[in-house]
Image: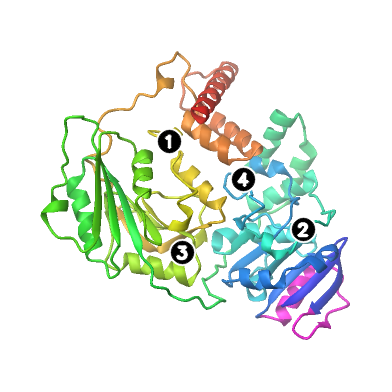
Amino acid sequence: MILLTHKDDKVYEIIDLKTNQVVFNTIKKPSKALFIVANTYKERILIWCHISQKDHLNFEGIKASFYLKNMMLSYTKKQYLPDQIGYVEDSPFLKVNKNVSYPTWLMSSEVGAIYTSELLKFKNTINLNNSLDYVLNSIAKLGIPNGLFCYSEPHLLIKNEVNVQNEKASIFQLFKFVKQHYKSVWCILLFLNLIMYEKRFLLIALIKTLFIKRIYFSSSFDLETMITLEIKDVSIDVIIPTLGRQSYLYDVLLDLEKQSFLPKQVIIIEQNEDKNSISELNFIQNRHWPFKIIHKFIHQTGACNARNLALKHVTADYVYLADDDNKFDENLLENVITKMQLHNFSALTMSYLQKNETEKHKTPIQWNAFGSGCSVIKSKYLNDVSFNMAYEFGYGEDTDFGMQLRNLGADIIYIPDIKVLHLKAPVGGFRTKIIHPWEKDGVIRPKPSPTVMLSRINNSTKQQLLGYKTNLFIKFYKSQNIKNPFKYLRSFKQQWQHSINWANHLKNN
C-alpha cells in the first residue's frame, strides 16, 4: 500500500508502506501526486487521507474491504459537493447511510483508497489542476456507470472523531461539475431549481458553464477478485407469487427442474380473490419434483403481500425472487451462486429483458434499481427487510426494497451476462382494475401517484424530491389539457400537495 497524506490541498507526505520509505517528496499538488504514484506503483492500493486522520487509519479494514480490484472507497461525514447536487442527480447514491458500506460516487479527500491500475484509466480524462476533492468526485462519477464500484466505507478508519475542515464546493464549482458530468440541460434545471426553491438567481454561474465542456469516459472495469473466497456448499430457495398463469408457472418449474444446481425449496403463493375459488395448480401434487414445493393458496391479491408471505418460508442461504413468467437456461442458479460467492455480492439483479430487447450494459455495475422478479439476495437480510404494504397495487415497492437492502450494507450489483427472459405473459395478473381511494375522493387527482410520492419521500434527499417535482411539472405539461401556464402551475401545485397528503396517509396507516 502507498499512503498519501495532505493538508490544505498540498501534499504533506507520500509513504511506501511496504518499505516505510518516503517517496516523491517534491510533488505538491495532491491530485497530480495520485497519478504520478499510480504510474510508478501500478499494482498497489493507493490510500489518501488528511494528515489529521493518519493515526486513525484502519489498514486491516482497508485491505479487507478491497475484495475486488475495481473498487474506490472513501469516507467522510461532510461531503464536498453541496446538497443541491440532488436537483440534478436522481439515484439512490446521494442519501448515504454513513453507518454501513454504502454505494455512492460522493468521494472525499478526508480518507479513501483505490487500486492504482484502476486509477490510471482516468489519466487522460481528468484535469489535475482541480482540487483533490473535485478530482475524486469526478473519478467516481465517471467510473460508477462503467463498472467502478464506489462506496462510502466507515471501516477505513478505526474511529472518526477528528473534526476535519473539508473543502466545500462553491456554487460555481457545483455548476462546473454538473456541466462536466451531465447533459447541458441539467445546468439550466439546476439554475431554475435554485430560483424556485432557494430564491437564488445565479445567472453568472450559469453563463460561465457555456465555456465548459462535458467530460466523456469510455473505459470499463472488469470484476477481478483480490481476496480468495471459498466456494461454500450453500443452498437457494425460489419464491414465486402467481395469479392465473398456471401454464407459465408450470414452465418455470420445468426450468427449475433442469437446473444444474437445484433449489432447496420453491415457495409458491397462489392468489385468487374469489372466495369460492380453488387452486389451479394441480401439477404441484400430480408429479414428482426434485425439490420441496411449499404452496400457499390465498384469497388476498397483491404482490407485496404474496412476496412477504413467501419470504417467511425461506430457509436457504440465498433466495431468488422470481416471477411466474420467467424463462432461463439450466445453469442460471449455479452461475448466480458462483458469481455471488466469488465476488462477495450480497444482492444481485440479472438482465431481465423481453424478446427482441437489447441489453445496453456490457459490464457489471452498481445498480440504481432493484428487480423483484429477477434478483437473488443473501437470506441473512430477510429479518430486516420486507415489501412495504403501503405500495400494494401501486408503484415503488421495488425501489423501496432495494433501499432497505442498501441501508443494511447490501449493495445491488447488476450482472448483464446472466440473463432471464421476461415472457410478459398476456394472461393472468390482476383481472380487475384496482380503484385506489385517491381516485374517488374528489376532483383533484394526485400527481404523481401517492405510492410513487411515498417512495420519493422515504428514499430521496430534499433536493432530489424537489428536482423530481420540477421535472414532472415540465414533462406533464405537454400531455395535459390546461395550456395556460399559470393555471397549469396552480393545478399542478394542488395535485402535488394532494399526492403528499395521500403519501403521508399511506405511511402512517
Q: Quadrant of residue 2?
A: bottom right
| Residue position for label 1 | 389
Specify start and end residues of the magenta stretch as a single range. 16-42
| Residue 89 image label | 4
Calculate the distance from the C-alpha at mark 4 to the C-alpha at mark 3.
Answer: 23 Å
Q: Nearer the viewer, mark 1 or mark 4?
A: 1
Q: From this view, report whether residue 45 is shown above or below residue 413.
A: below
Q: Local crowd at mark 2 within 10 Å, few (<14), some, or many (≥20)?
A: some
Amino acid bearing label 2: Asn
Amino acid bearing label 3: Lys
Q: Is residue 469 left or right of residue 54?
A: left
Tag 1 secondary structure: helix
Calculate the distance from the C-alpha at mark 1 to the C-alpha at mark 3.
Answer: 35 Å
Amino acid bearing label 1: Met
- Front-most of residues 398 and 274: 274
Calculate the distance from the C-alpha at mark 1 to the C-alpha at mark 4.
Answer: 28 Å
Sequence-first tag of 1 and 3 = 3
Q: Which residue lies at the image location 49% right of the left edge and 34% below the top edge?
A: 452
Q: Nearer the viewer, mark 2 or mark 3?
A: 2
Sequence-first tag of 2 and 1 = 2
